Image (cartoon, grey):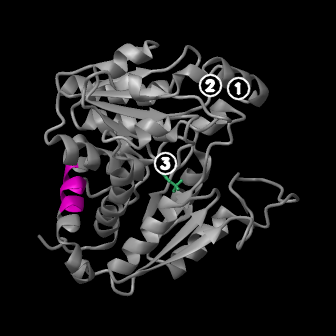
Amino acid sequence: MTAAIRHFLSFLDYTSADLTELIDLARRLKANRADLHREGLHGKVMGMVFFNPSLRTRTSFESLMAKLGGHAICLSVGGDTWSLEHRDGAVMDGAAAEHVREAAPVLSRYCDLLGVRTFAGLKDATEDAQDAVIRSFARHSTVPLINMESTMEHPCQGLADRMTLEEKLGNARGRRFVLTWAPHVKGLPMAVPHSAILAAASAGMSVTVVHPPGYELNADIVSKAQSWCAAAGGELEISDQQINACQSADVIYVKSWGSSALYGQPQEQTKSFARHKDWRVDMTHFGDKDALLMHCLPVRRNVVIADAALDSRHSVVVDQAENRLWAQAAVVLRLCCTTEPRP
Ligand code: CP
């Protein structure tokens, strides 16, 4: 892995080979789970800063730090810790009592590793594309920083997803990965779909993204995924033909995200979801193929995916969630340990 990379913020900072190396380590850790305490994280502390809720991310990091012999501290911004400002030059006469310029270096004195979760505000697409909160933490932290989902990417989810794809498919290269949009009750960020297509593309899969018009993903992310697909001899297609794409897929990855055309318009967004409610994924999407069903969770049953599909043999959503722990353990060891993890 490139020595200069100190944080784990974005798949765009990595080569496909770097990601393969991390997944190989994650698989070794999973296979030797009884020996995790020997991996050398004793006395190491991870500080986790959550601007938004979590079940998997928080619990998997707390669990892996304990299993590796370290410790994790969880802070909820505006709950059990101060509301934080990140904009340089801000006049802090509102809710925020502390600036990231102090919070990040102070936490770096207490902790050996930091993680930050900060969702897109979904009001201003240009502002969200800058990923300003995690970038501010990256500038002001003096210890390695992990992106636990930011406005643009969820690389921990992406790494676990690629691990799951290769675990289930063997060599995933050339297999058909379909990311399908699905309706929801409110607009959601694009971080997970971005990371899902980067993960599949980095594994050499042929990727199809299906969504209704007006739900386009970030062009730079799509372009990077396209280049990885092309390097593996495949391609990335974008379509609005959901059933056709799903019925020829090896993997159907379902995710809801908000409309790029209706950004910052929550009422119009709700009406758009209602117009597209038949995009909910059910058993008809599988045709006669034995495709995998993936979702990052949490999932709203019978809005996003029907019970019958989630409860079917196709679903690997719980395996995906488990692999968060192993993939993140690999990232933590790579960032915190100067010596090679044990073979
Ligand atoms: N997939 C995921 O990140 O789950 P949480 O939001 O529960 O952490």
Q: Which of the 4 quarters of the picture holds residue 43?
A: bottom left
Can you give x and y, in whole percent of width and height, for residue 117 in the image? 56, 56
Quick one: label 2 or label 3, which is nearer the N terminus? 2
Mark 3 lies on residue? 297
Could you tell me which quadrant the N terminus lies in? bottom left
**Three-letter code for the amino acid on which mark 1 is drawn:** Gln
Q: Does the residue labelled 3 lie within 8 Å of ligand 1?
A: yes
**Three-letter code for the amino acid on which mark 3 is drawn:** Leu
The mark closer to the camera, 2 or 3, is 3
Q: Which element carries disc 1, helix, strand or loop?
A: helix
Mark 2 lies on residue? 259
| Residue closest to the far bottom | 43
Mark 1 touching mark 2, by CB under 8 A?
yes
Mark 1 lies on residue? 269
**Three-letter code for the amino acid on which mark 2 is drawn:** Ser
What span is in magenta? 20-27
The vertical placement of 197 against 334, above or below, is above
